[in-house]
Amino acid sequence: MNIKTIVIAGVQEDIKITRTDAGATVSVERFTRAAGKHDHVIAEVGREEDRDARYAKAVEVAKAVYGTDRRGRAAATNSMVHDVLNEIERVAGC
């Protein structure tokens, strides 16, 4: 069984994790006058990437999911970042 898409409710907008041939793409849906509705890609996670690289991308996604603190870091604990990483890995098939 393969999961194609997971949507996570973020602080300001929904984050969509979509399965691709190489892994997964994490994006948010944005609207601009010029382009209309389009997906703004936050991160692309490959299956062959090492765990540290995937964790670094999960931290960037956690900023969109949980928001940021005053210093610009993700307002999430380590276990919250690991929850985001687990969902990305589920969709990517890592």
Image: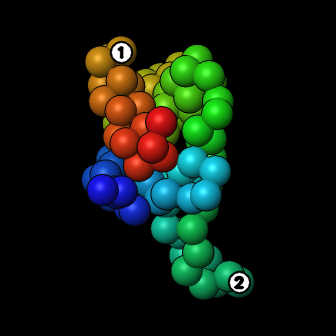
Identify the secondary structure beneath mark 1: helix
73 sits left or right of 76 in the view: right
Q: Against 47, is 71 above or below?
A: above
Q: Position of residue 13 (x, y in %)?
A: 38, 58
Disc 2 residue type? Answer: Ala
Q: Which quadrant holds the N terminus?
A: bottom left
Residue at screen point 58% across, 17% down: 52
Rounded to the nearest angstrom, the CA distance separating label 1 from label 2 is: 38 Å
In the rendered image, which quarter is residue 84 located in? top left
Q: Look at 64% across and 30% down and name the residue there.
A: 49
Residue 42 relative to residue 61: left or right: right
Q: Secondary structure at mark 2?
A: loop
Please give the label number shown on residue 19.
none
Q: What count of labels does the image hold?
A: 2
Task: Read off the residue under disc 1.
Answer: 78
Closer-to-camera residue (66/48): 48
Determine the residue positioned at 35% across, 33% down.
86
Across and down, in percent, residue 80 comes to 30, 25
- The label on residue 34 is 2
Give whichever of discs 1 and 2 has the lower sequence position. Answer: 2
Q: Position of residue 60 (x, y in %)?
A: 54, 34
Is residue 14 found left or right of 21 in the rendered image?
A: left
Amino acid type of the residue tagged 1 in the rendering:
Asn
Would you identify the image quadrant in which residue 47 lies? top right
Examine the rendering and report whether any part of residue 56 can be seen: no
Disc 1 and disc 2 in contact, CB within 8 angstroms: no
Please tell me how crowded label 1 is: few (under 14), some (14-19), or many (20+) other residues with Cα within 10 Å.
few
